[in-house]
Image (spheres, rainbow, N blue to C red):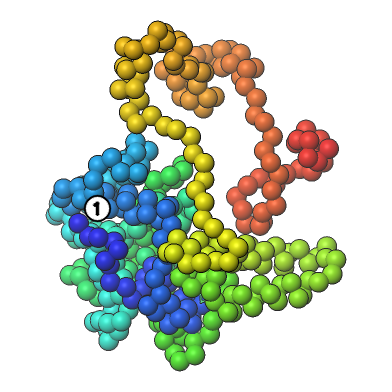
């Protein structure tokens, strides 16, 4: 099993593409800077490692019963494993597909050994001359394979380093959440070559030059290891205050709102940094570390209940709570009942949809625009 924390790191690595292609100077600035890990990132790594072990058919390397060893997490792990196995089987009709897990790939073959990364999953279907380049994602932010520079870099390097000659390349984001967990986008080898020539090499050249520009922005700063500690990012936020030191005019919101996202990100990064510093023993005058209050939990529910049954007079109804399924759970359960239209109409009379909270989002957001002339939205507007 590959220990993700021991992965070699290139400052021009595939996974940093989105950052250094938008902020060229970030590649050199981040050299040697350790990425602070959050609990969510550690949980993602845990799922990633389990997927990898199962697909490689090697024993599990972690201790069972750890904090991430939950039914929900295993459900996500198994969904990805099942999808990958089905895909490999579908690529192996005449000739068994070649599969590489956690493959280190580089541009050494074209004189750029410093540009390398690790591909989570590489599958090659020789019969169809089809390369599948996959990335496991376990975060809540949905990722698209379309125009995904990380996957395209990995595919370009794979074609250089592996014994493959694809005509088609499918970029895959395997993210087992939501309605569309396995997103694929297929491009031709010619399209990949054009992207490499027109975007990848110029971006690399810009990032490798002395004094490469530092360009703050919401997307690139989000996962940058120096976020919160970057003078240009800080200055950009200060400029926002200086530019808006008076009552805002209506037409200023369009420019200002995206900058607020960046400011929130910056503030969050500074808070995380301070917490990390304090957890490592650093002293921040006027502040202390405290632990949040938690509720007591059962160590083992069934053992606890057997003990209560044997040692107390509480009946099952006294010690258990039963409640009706949620509406979506009930609709799912009722599928087996084959209710007719009349019964579904009667059922609907017991269901209502509360109005959602109103949010202001960019026009590109997939949400349906609110009709502010509709007085039944909720109490906020009427
Ligand atoms: S924090 Fe943002 S601006 Fe600063 S180096 Fe990183 S990506 Fe660039």
Q: Is residue 221 above or below residue 76?
A: below
Image-based side of 139 in relation to 48, left or right: right
Q: Nearer the viewer, residue 323 or 204?
A: 323
Asked whether mark 1 lies closer than 8 Å to ligand 1, one says: no
Helix, strand or loop at label 1? It is: helix
Residue at 67% over, 31% down: 354
Residue at 34% over, 12% down: 311
Q: Position of residue 308 (x, y in %)?
A: 36, 16
Residue furthest bottom as drawn: 210
- Residue 234 seen from this side: yes
Residue that badge 1 annotates: 52
- Residue 192 seen from this side: no
Q: Position of residue 340 (x, y in %)?
A: 52, 13
Classify mark 1: residues with Cα within 10 Å, few (<14), some (14-19) or many (20+): many
Q: Quadrant of the C terminus?
A: top right
Image-based side of 89 in relation to 293, left or right: left
Tell me where residue 364 sits by quadrant: bottom right
Q: Nearer the viewer, residue 271 or 218?
A: 271
Q: Position of residue 232 (x, y in %)?
A: 59, 79
Residue at 27% over, 49% down: 51
Tell me where residue 16 sits by quadrant: bottom left
Q: Is residue 147 above or below residue 353?
A: below
Q: Position of residue 149 (x, y in %)?
A: 42, 69
Residue at 46% over, 11% down: 318
| Label total for image | 1
Q: Is residue 212 above or below residue 101?
A: below
Q: Nearer the viewer, residue 285 or 328?
A: 285
Q: Quadrant of the N terminus?
A: bottom left
């Amino acid at each position: 099993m590959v220990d993700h924390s021991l992965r070699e790191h290139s400052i021009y690595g595939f996974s940093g593409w989105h950052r250094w292609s938008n902020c060229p100077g970030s590649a050199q600035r981040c050299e040697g800077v350790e990425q602070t890990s959050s609990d969510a990132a550690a949980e993602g790594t845990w799922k990633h490692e389990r997927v990898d072990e199962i697909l490689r058919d090697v024993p599990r390397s972690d201790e069972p019963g750890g904090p991430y060893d939950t039914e929900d997490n295993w459900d996500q792990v198994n969904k990805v494993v099942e999808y990958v196995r089905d895909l490999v089987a579908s690529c192996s009709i005449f000739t068994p597909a070649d599969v590489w897990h956690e493959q280190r790939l580089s541009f050494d073959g074209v004189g750029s050994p410093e540009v390398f990364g690790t591909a989570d999953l590489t599958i090659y279907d020789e019969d169809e001359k089809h390369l599948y380049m996959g990335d496991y994602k376990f975060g809540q932010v949905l990722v698209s394979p379309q125009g995904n520079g990380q996957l395209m870099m990995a595919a370009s390097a794979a074609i250089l380093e592996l014994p493959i000659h694809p005509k088609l390349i499918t970029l895959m984001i395997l993210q087992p959440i939501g309605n569309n967990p396995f997103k694929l986008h297929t491009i031709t080898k010619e399209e990949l070559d054009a992207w490499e020539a027109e975007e990848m090499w110029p971006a690399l050249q810009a990032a490798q030059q002395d004094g490469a520009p530092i360009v703050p922005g919401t997307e690139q700063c989000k996962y940058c290891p120096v976020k919160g500690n970057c003078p240009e990012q800080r200055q950009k936020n200060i400029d926002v205050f200086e530019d808006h030191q008076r009552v805002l005019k209506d037409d200023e919101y369009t420019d200002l709102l995206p900058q607020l996202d960046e400011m929130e990100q910056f503030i969050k990064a500074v808070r995380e940094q301070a917490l990390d510093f304090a957890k490592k023993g650093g002293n921040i005058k006027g502040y202390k570390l405290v632990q949040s209050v938690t509720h007591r939990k059962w160590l083992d529910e069934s053992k606890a209940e057997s003990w209560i049954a044997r040692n107390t007079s509480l009946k099952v109804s006294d010690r258990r709570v039963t409640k009706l399924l949620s509406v979506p759970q009930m609709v799912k359960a009722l599928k087996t009942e084959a209710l007719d239209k009349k019964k579904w109409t009667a059922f609907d009379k017991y269901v209502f949809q509360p109005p959602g909270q109103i949010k202001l989002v960019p026009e590109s957001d997939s949400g349906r625009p609110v009709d502010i002339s509709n007085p039944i939205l909720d109490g906020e507007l009427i």
